[in-house]
Image (cartoon, rainbow, N blue to C red):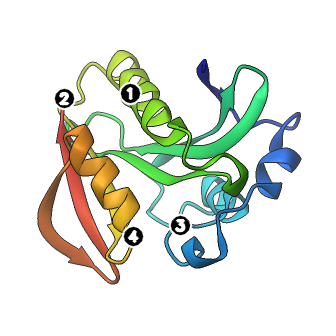
Amino acid sequence: MTIKLKPVTRDNWEEAIQMKVKEWQRDFVPSAAVSLAKVYIKPDGDAVEYIPFSIYDNDKMVGFIMHAYEPDTVNMYWINGFFIDQKYQGRGYGRAALAVMISWIKSKFPKCEEIRLTVHKDNQHARILYKNFGFSPTGEIWGEEELYYFLV
């Protein structure tokens, strides 16, 4: 397995929006299309920048992940819309992609001291993945999601 993050561009966006999670996971994470819309709409405010990536194993697209951040902060570095396509789940891609994303954030943003994400309260697989990786719940609940953080 060789995991790479490649920006979503006009060359691969159509393939990205075709990826899906399993039916029972659909309430846990937005589709790639919804995440890509956020880049343009900026629902979290004009100060937030979004960088969407497709997750590849060599040349095969296996998932989607997006980074959102507020420049000149130490703790507003987010992982959003992260999922592995239903055809590729259970093969270690999620853990590998999470490691690559965290490494990318740390190298691109030396000021970053904390990475954040939210996880749906019923998404036990993601909760286990994030906790095993070193993320901790903050205790804050946003709707159906719990806020987690990772100290860099």
SS label for mark 4: loop
Q: Residue at x 28, y 33 (%)?
A: 72
Residue 107 position, x and y percent, is 36, 16
Judge by depth and name the residue closer to the eye, 118 or 77. 118
Residue carrying label 3: 29
**Contact, mark 3 vs mark 4 (Cβ under 8 Å):** yes
| Mark 2 or mark 4, whichever is nearer to me | 4
The type of residue carrying mark 1 is Ile
Dot 1 and dot 3 residues touching (CB under 8 Å) = no
Q: Earlier in the sequence, mark 2 or mark 4?
A: 4
Location of residue 86 by image quarter: bottom right
User: Mark 3 is on which residue type?
Assistant: Val
CA gap, disc 4 to disc 1?
A: 24 Å
Report which residue position mark 4 lands on.
123
Upstream in sequence: badge 2 or badge 3: 3
Say left or right for 152 vs 32. left
Circle 1 is placed at which residue position? 105
Percent x, y for residue 108?
40, 19
Cα separation between marks 1 and 3: 21 Å
Q: Residue furthest left?
A: 139
What separation in Å lies between label 1 and label 2 (alpha carbons)?
A: 10 Å
Residue underneath mark 2: 152
Residue farthest toward the front in the current orientation of the protein: 90
